[in-house]
């Protein structure tokens, strides 16, 4: 397999099914990586994934994430330096409570398969909550 490298794009290359901006980064057969950005005051749509798990690392901004799975549920504060997991089947939603973009580095395992991966679910916040 050849080496690859890719700089972070200044502009989003698309949008995730939850509504966050996506900037694609590196990928390998077992995983892919991207930066997700949620503008100030925005609430992402609540979703669950069909086939992928994710690991997130908060780069900048402030917000909250809701995760629920098998009777467990929590709302966690998002702040720079925090790492968290989104295991397969977890329902989740996140929001930007700060004044700057919420920037999250996400690793998806296996690589993101396409727009049908995320399924809408009910979450704690309406999209017009902020």
Image: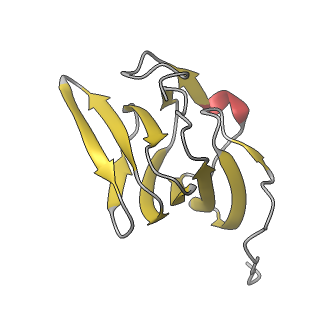
User: For residue 88, which quarter of the picture?
Assistant: top left
Q: Residue furthest left?
A: 72
Compared to 89, does 100 lie above or below?
below
**In the orientation shown, which residue stands out farthest toward the front?**
99
On the image, the x and y values in percent for residue 77 come to: 29, 49
Q: Which residue corresponds to the image point at 41% horizontal and 33% vertical from the top-left?
A: 92
Of 7 and 102, nearer the camera is 102
Left or right of 4? Residue 58 is left
Place of residue 4 in the rendered image (x, y in percent of width and height, measured from the top left) = 75, 80
Q: Is residue 3 above or below residue 105?
A: below
Towards the viewer: 77 or 34: 77
Question: Residue drawn 61% across and 60% down?
Answer: 35
> What residue do we see at 60% from left, 62% from top?
33
Q: How far across and down, in percent of the image, does residue 51 sit?
A: 52, 36
What x and y, as percent, mark residue 110?
A: 55, 51
* Most foreground residue, 111 or 55: 55
């Amino acid at each position: 397999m050849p080496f690859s490298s890719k700089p972070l794009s200044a502009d989003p290359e698309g949008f995730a099914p939850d509504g966050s901006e996506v900037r694609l980064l590196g990928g390998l057969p077992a995983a892919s990586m991207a930066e997700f950005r949620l503008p100030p005051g925005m609430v992402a749509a609540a979703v669950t994934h069909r086939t992928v798990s994710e690991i997130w690392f908060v780069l900048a901004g402030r917000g909250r994430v809701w995760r629920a799975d098998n009777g467990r549920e929590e709302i966690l504060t998002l702040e720079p330096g925090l790492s968290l997991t989104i295991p397969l089947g977890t329902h989740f939603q996140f929001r930007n409570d700060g004044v700057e973009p919420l920037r999250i580095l996400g690793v998806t395992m296996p690589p993101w398969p396409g727009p049908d991966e995320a399924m809408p679910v009910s979450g704690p916040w309406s999209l017009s909550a902020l």
